[in-house]
Amino acid sequence: MAHELTSPSLSDSARSCERPSRPGWWRDAVIYQVYVRSFADSDGDGIGDLRGARERLPHIAGLGADAVWLTPFYASPQADGGYDVADYRAVDPVFGDLADADDLVRAAHGLGLKVIVDIVPNHTSDRHPWFLQALAGIGRDRYVFRPGRGPGGAEPPNDWESVFGGPAWTRVADGSWYLHLFAPQQPDLDWTNAEVRAEFDSVLRFWLDLGVDGFRIDVAHGMVKAEGLPDIGHGQQAKLIGTQRLPFFDQDGVHEIHRGWRRLLESYGPDRIGVAEAWAPTPERLALYVRPDELHQAFNFQFLNCPWDATALRAVVDDSLRATASVGAPTTWVLSNHDVVRHSTRYGSPARARAGALLMLALPGSAYVYQGEELGLPEVVDLPDEARQDPAFLRGDGQDGLRDGCRVPLPWTQDGPSYGFGPGGSWLPQPPQWQALSVEAQSADPSSTLELYRRALGVRRDHPALGAGEAVEWLDGLPEGVLAFRRRPEGLGGEGDGGEGGAVLVTLNTTDREVELPLSGAPLLSSAPPAPVLPSPAAEFTDRAAQGHNVRVPADSCVWWAI
Ligand code: BGC
């Protein structure tokens, strides 16, 4: 089977066919996350790079995504997979150079894909020139340096813990301490410093001038710390994180920074966006990040964290939609990313993962797809310790320390070194079972997860009721564990004619049994693959729907119906 490589001249042809932007494109966009070091490797060093990503862009365009988000590819010692930036305007040689970044942006635009890049403003690398100067006693007020407590200042300035484990403070040679909410190689910047703000405005302009369409803002909830850096209380942090505001997360002061960035983005026109990676304790607090004068999107981690439970899922959907509607913003759904266990493993089965994807893609708003979820990749849970690179793992007791398992390089082909990831090996070992999950193996197999995603994004595009449509209308009185809701295109009062662009009914069965529902509709797409011997569910649904009978919905499935 042919590889999906593009010719080296793609960039030139791309320039000639750039598509005009759809206003508000981001409101219902499907955005594909490329974790650059694990996506595609062009030079055989085992680490993905920008050229490799450019060559594989047709996969993303062919899937039907609207945009790509690229994780950090800037100059970095890679103490945290590039989230430790030493030069925000340079590409790390391991990923290529600025010309590669430029080529990638142009090639993506040529394929109709927007490009969002990561920006890491909470902290720099400890190799950033500013931090090297700070160690030498110059410009320390760009970071958070404080004297220690206790005899001789030998205790950290407060009781904050690093997200990766251990104290959030490290002592330097002259006896003072600096703050790092993440690894010691990631010193926190002090955002009360005007020079820090001006520098990031300049960095954003640098990438906007290069043509990027927006930024995913790393730790968008962390840049401002509570006045006086108060203690949290012994042993409290782990209990409170995620459920309450902490003195270093979700402080009100961050919003003024985001307002400034919104103005900066708008000075480049209405189409450049900011998406907040913000962990807020409630949907209401999260919605503050997407007020009309702030960022455009904020990842809905409450949805990501929700278990495979119909009641809980319905509550999260309702709470999220209510909160974002209160500020006039769409909701931004996500199930997987480079920091969490893949949802195929979290949900406990590939069938549920496929159903979860169809649920997500049927909800109003934007959706992010993490590379490899379209292949149904599971978390790799048995990586050898010596292969792991997550600083959380290396520091021992922070987070879960297991983020390498969702970062294993993608399998593209059934044969060849690293299953087509690149001409050499891969920086994390790929399980042999991934041969059968490769893009090549799944392409053209109608029962594959890859084909399901391709069809889902196509149907979503043809049916504005999905994504862009009006609010979710729940149907009540269904069996336990089963949800159903209608989506109508904007401005359409009654039900559609069942054809393209009409209203859509979505059924979600989270139980392990097939259920019969008193509903009718013509099946558009089902997450459950056709049974090998029995008539396919689609045929079954069609006959029954045509006769106005109940429909049978497979276990652990999501089905879209035209109504
Ligand atoms: C990124 C992580 C990173 C952390 C520190 C996160 O939110 O997604 O991968 O380790 O920020 O930059």
Image (cartoon, rainbow, N blue to C red):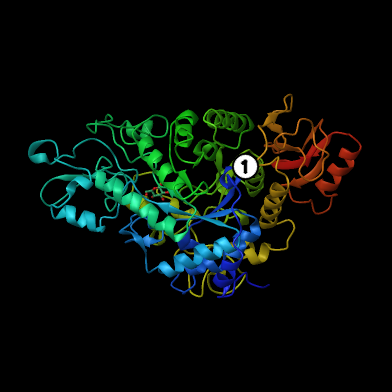
Image vertical order of residue 489 relative to residue 137, above or below: above
Is residue 390 visible from the viewing direction of this image? no
In which quadrant will I find the C terminus?
Answer: top right
* Marker count (numbered): 1
x, y (%) of residue 172? 15, 50
Q: Is residue 459 left or right of residue 417?
A: right
- The image quadrant that residue 356 belongs to is top right
Image vertical order of residue 70 relative to residue 27, above or below: below
Q: Is residue 312 left or right of residue 269?
A: right
In which quadrant will I find the N terminus?
Answer: bottom right
Task: Name which residue lies at 64% across and 44% down.
Answer: 361
**Between 563 and 111, which is closer to the camera in this rendering?**
111
Image vertical order of residue 469 relative to residue 115, above or below: above
x, y (%) of residue 100? 45, 69
Q: Amino acid at mark 1?
A: Met
x, y (%) of residue 213? 50, 53
Residue receiving disc 1 = 360
Q: What secondary structure is marked by label 1?
A: helix
- The image quadrant that residue 556 belongs to is top right
